[in-house]
Image (spheres, rainbow, N blue to C red):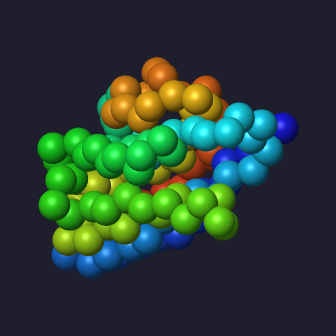
Amino acid sequence: QVQLVESGGGLVQPGGSLRLSCAASGFTSDYYAIGWSRQAPGKEREGVSCISDSDGSTYYADSVKGRFTISRDNAKNTVYLQMNSLKPEDTAVYYCAAVPAHGCGLTPDIYHYWGQGTQVTVSS
């Protein structure tokens, strides 16, 4: 049974930082890709970042490039999203998602498994 559990969300002031964690378990495949997506009220789910298992390649949406960093600790089966210089428009529920035996991508539709989401609120 595949499970993804996000943590690390919360309330932060503009310009602040948060680090989100995604703990994965239950995979039977030898490798998988992990992506982060977010959804703000009234908006479609948007791909934010992803990291591949095959070569560790990373990708970012233009809106977060240079501010967010995704990383992976395979020994701990955990993926992190370091978010710096946060802006009010980053406010959303952030979801961790996984797809086995697949390269990563920013399109949410490619992911098979999803976590429950963690709220990130950037406000003064």
Residue drawn at (21%, 53%) of the image? 64
Which quadrant would the C terminus be assigned to in this image? bottom left
Q: Identify whether 103 is placed above or below 31.
A: above
- Left or right: 10 in relation to 113: left
Which quadrant would the N terminus be assigned to in this image? top right
Residue drawn at (41%, 50%) of the image? 56
Between 61 and 25, the residue placed more toward the observer is: 25
Tell me the quarter of the picture where residue 88 sits: bottom left
Residue drawn at (16%, 61%) of the image? 66
Number of on-image labels: 0
Residue 2 visible? The answer is: no
- Left or right: 118 in relation to 12: right
Q: Identify whether 13 is placed above or below 20.
A: below
Q: Position of residue 83 (x, y in %)?
A: 32, 66
Q: Identify whether 54 is placed above or below 110.
A: below
- Left or right: 81 in relation to 67: right
| Residue sitting at the far top | 109
Q: Position of residue 93 (x, y in %)?
A: 46, 49
Between 7 and 73, the residue placed more toward the observer is: 73
Residue 88 visible? The answer is: yes
Residue drawn at (27%, 61%) of the image? 68
Tell me the quarter of the picture where residue 40 sits: top left
Q: Position of residue 33 (x, y in %)?
A: 51, 40
Q: Identify whether 110 is placed above or below 88.
A: above
